[in-house]
Every structure is written in structure tokens, then in C-alpha cells.
Image (spheres, grey):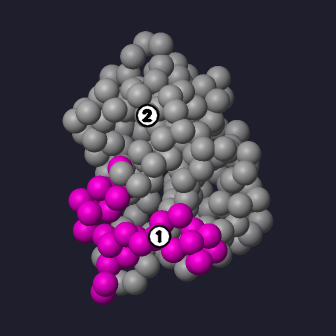
């Protein structure tokens, strides 16, 4: 059974809340230092893969992809890149993901709080995928740079027919008033698709 980008984001978002709630002090400490990549890639995503029944491998030789998730009967199902520096995604992470043979490509990165929810990044990626004649699912997960709250995420799902939409869950409404996610939530409608 194919695991969709929408399935991935829903599980990512909901299970991340649970993951943080188990040890909020660790989250608060990690979000402010260089251990963030390890917290997300090596800890949380590893746990998420197991929870969803995927075998996780780190295959740096395959287009320098951070992670691949597979099920023995299906082969590689999901390729994942995590990058703290959004400026590098256009030359490194996105091209690497596009070369990888997997039905779902996932990029997790971060935008400045003032630019969250990153609609400009989502639009630029849409144009790049269209120019590349992309015909699979691509999930862009953007976090706010400060990640003040563990709900400061938004997903943009690109489908083979080259449309994209916001993926927002109602628990986004529970964010603290001062968080970038809460401010961004107030400026958009949760059920509105944002592209062509």
C-alpha cells in the first residue's frame, strides 16, 4: 500500500507533539543549539519510521540522501532530506530528492519566523517542480526557525498533477499566542488550497 504525503505529514505532525510532550525540557534545550538536526533526524524520524512500520536506512551514497524508508515487500517508499539552512535546499537537497527513486520525497527545513508559513518558498518549489516535469509526490515540511512551539510546522504537498496545498491540522490552533505558527494561522484559512 502506497504511503501518501498527506499520511506522512499527519503522522509527522501528530507524533511530533507526543514526542515533545514526553520530554519538553529536552525539546526546549535542543531547539536552541546545534543538536537540533540529531533531535529530528536521528531521534524523532527514527522513532516515526518504526511507529509506521518502515525500515530506516541512511544511504549517503544514494544521491547523498539523509534517510530512506522502506518496507521489504515494496522497496524504497520514502526518501527524506532534513536541512536547517534553507538557502542550500535549491542546490543540494531538492536536486538530490528529485534524482532518488521513491514515490514520496520529503524535505524538512525551516524559514525565518517573519516568513512563516513560507508561502514564497512553497510557490518557488512548485515552479521548479513544474519545470522539471515532476510526476510523483513531494512533501515540503516547513518549521519556523525558532520552533517556539512544537506545532510550528506546515506541510505543502505537491501531487503528480502539479498542484499543491497546505496541510494544516486543528491542533495548530492550540499554539501559544506569540508563536510564529499562531500568527501565521490567523492569516490563512485552514481548508483553503493555495495553488493552481
User: Residue at left 41%, top 55%?
Assistant: 42
Tell me which numbered mark, 2 or 1, is placed earlier along the sequence.
2
Q: Residue furthest bottom?
A: 73
Q: Which residue is mark 2?
A: 30
Is residue 7 at all visible to an observer of this figure?
A: no
User: Residue at left 70%, top 66%?
Assistant: 95
Q: Residues within 10 Å of mark 2 (few under 14, many from 20)?
A: some
Q: Residues within 10 Å of mark 1 (few under 14, many from 20)?
A: some
User: Residue at left 65%, top 68%?
Assistant: 96
Q: Which residue is mark 1?
A: 58
- In which quadrant will I find the N terminus? bottom left
Q: Position of residue 52 (x, y in %)?
A: 26, 63
Quadrant of the rendered structure where residue 61 is?
bottom right
Q: Is residue 140 above or below residue 105?
A: above
User: Residue at left 42%, top 39%?
Assistant: 168
Magenta span has 60?
yes
Q: Regarding mark 1 in the picture, which secondary structure is present there? A: loop
The residues colored magenta run 44-73
Q: Regarding mark 2 in the picture, which secondary structure is present there? A: helix
Tell which of 170 and 20 is nearer to you: 20
Left or right of residue 185, residue 135 in this image:
right
Q: CA–CA distance between discs 2 and 1?
A: 22 Å
Amino acid at each position: 500500500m502506497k504511503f501518501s504525503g498527506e499520511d506522512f505529514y499527519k503522522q509527522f505532525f501528530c507524533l511530533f507533539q507526543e514526542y515533545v510532550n514526553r520530554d519538553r525540557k529536552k525539546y526546549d534545550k535542543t531547539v536552541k543549539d546545534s543538536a537540533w538536526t540529531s533531535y529530528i533526524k536521528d531521534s524523532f524520524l527514527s522513532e516515526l519510521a518504526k511507529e509506521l512500520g518502515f525500515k530506516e536506512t541512511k544511504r549517503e551514497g544514494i544521491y547523498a540522501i539523509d534517510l530512506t524508508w522502506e518496507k521489504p515487500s515494496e522497496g524504497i517508499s520514502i526518501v527524506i532530506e532534513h536541512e536547517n539552512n534553507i538557502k542550500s535546499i535549491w542546490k543540494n537537497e531538492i536536486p538530490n530528492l528529485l534524482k532518488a527513486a521513491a514515490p514520496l520525497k520529503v524535505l524538512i527545513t525551516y524559514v525565518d519566523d517573519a516568513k512563516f508559513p513560507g508561502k514564497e518558498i512553497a510557490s518557488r518549489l512548485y515552479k521548479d517542480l513544474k519545470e522539471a516535469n515532476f510526476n510523483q509526490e513531494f512533501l515540503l515540511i516547513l518549521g519556523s526557525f525558532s520552533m517556539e512551539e512544537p506545532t510550528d510546522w506546515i506541510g505543502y504537498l505537491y501531487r503528480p498533477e502539479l498542484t499543491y496545498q497546505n496541510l494544516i491540522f486543528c491542533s495548530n490552533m492550540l499554539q501559544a499566542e506569540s508563536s510564529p505558527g499562531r500568527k501565521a494561522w490567523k492569516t490563512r484559512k485552514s481548508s483553503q488550497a493555495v495553488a493552481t
